[in-house]
Amino acid sequence: MAYGVPAINDTTSNISESDSDDIFEITEDEFNNRNLVIGSPVPAAGEIEKDPIYIDDDLGIYEELDDLVQVESDDDHQICIGRNNQKISWGFCVDQGMRKYMEDRIVTFPSFMSLRCDSFGGCTAPHCRFASEVTPIHYFAVFDGHGGSQVSDHCADSLHEEVKKAWESEDCTNEWNKRWQSALSRAYDSADKACEEETGVGSTALVVLVSACQIVAANCGDSRAILCRGSQIIPLSEDHRPDREDEEQRIAKSGGRVLADLWGVLRVDGVLAMSRAIGDKSLKPSVSSVPELTFTTRSEEDECIIIASDGLWDVVSTECVGNLACELLQHERQSAHFGESPTQYVAECLFKEACSRSSSDNFSVIVVDLKPARRN
């Protein structure tokens, strides 16, 4: 498992208050003092009945080592997406920007759970023999703190454990999507209650779970995730802002108000520019911690997932991010040498693009490649 703060080793770049291009680094000891893990094997989340996973913590490459196999259902010739796309790689970039403090946190946790494909969300070839096999579930998350980093720290440290615990305690006879809705809502509620003492401090919480054949995204706040599929850009989340009609109605029913500040920005009770978040005790229940979920079946055309804080989305459009990422990723897949990470390159390019558009906010992005890696 890897966590993100202002910088991790040499994989992130930082713009200081003097606009220098120097890399901002913190030592491994400083990480360990924060109970963070770097450069260590991914902790097992139960036995995975598959070949071992190759792990390269520095580059964020997590690949199944077995050969790709064309697997189809015997009766209807449906293709099992996961069996044909068993390699997964990811890269990230986090940066403090021009802000005084770094309040963003990210977590990447490959194989954080192991579930049967048909129990996580269904196999794309439900009648093939692999539908009932155990598949690794990969966990990716972005937490954008405000008012301090206490809540984003807590979410980075423990939300994945709350998700796993909540899932395992769910009634296994329920439909899988209802089970995920309940489990993730309870996990977010637990995180919110654990932060009740943090008045005036909160965080977004965007979690994306990726299995062999399904993608589940849970969002609370204004961080954002998209799926690039062929020429399409599919939103995996929708920003929670007070100007959303349904959110404004929910806020009003809870007794809150949406007020504009001096610059015309709409805020909950004139304070917070997002309508859902973990923490922010003083604004409850107007600011909700209940996540919205999306469920997406994977396709052979899927290119990548991009998960980021508003340090990216506030200055670069969703379409531009998706198109740029796909163009770079497709090129880098063909040209990358063994050991190099195309996704890391894409993440850093997205950071540079945000900087070129005068982003000054904390910046966090995770790029997940859903295509098998190609090696020269």
Image (cartoon, rainbow, N blue to C red):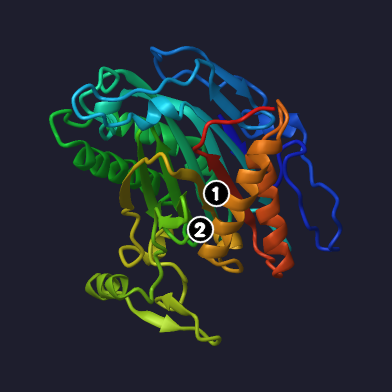
**Residue nearest the viewer, comparing 347 with 257:** 347
Q: Residue 236, percent across and down? A: 39, 53
Name the residue carrying label 1: 150
Is the residue under label 1 in contact with that under label 2 (CB below 8 Å)? yes
Residue drawn at x 79%, y 47% as measured from the top left? 24
Q: Amino acid at mark 2?
A: Val
On screen, 98 above or below 206? Answer: below
Q: For numbered disc 1, what is the local secondary structure?
A: helix
Residue drawn at x 58%, y 56% as measured from the top left? 148
**Residue nearest the viewer, comparing 166 with 32:** 166
Could you classify mark 2 by the number of other residues whose Cα lies within 10 Å: few (under 14), some (14-19), or many (20 or more)?
A: many
Q: For numbered disc 2, what is the local secondary structure?
A: loop
Q: Quadrant of residue 42?
A: top right
Name the residue carrying label 2: 201
On screen, 42 above or below 373? Answer: above
Q: Can residue 192 be seen at all in this image of the molecule?
A: yes
Give the quarter of the figure containing the N terminus. top right
Q: Quadrant of residue 220?
A: bottom left
Q: Quadrant of residue 237?
A: bottom left
Horizontal side of 175 relative to 99 (left or right) equals: left
Q: How many marks?
A: 2
Q: Residue 83, percent across and down? A: 39, 25
Give the quarter of the figure containing the C terminus. top right
Q: Amino acid at mark 1?
A: Gln
Could you classify mark 1 by the number of other residues whose Cα lies within 10 Å: few (under 14), some (14-19), or many (20 or more)?
A: some
Q: Residue 10, percent across and down? A: 77, 38
Kindly report the distance in space between the C-alpha atoms of the residues bearing marks 2 and 1.
7 Å
Horizontal side of 170 relative to 265 (left or right) equals: left
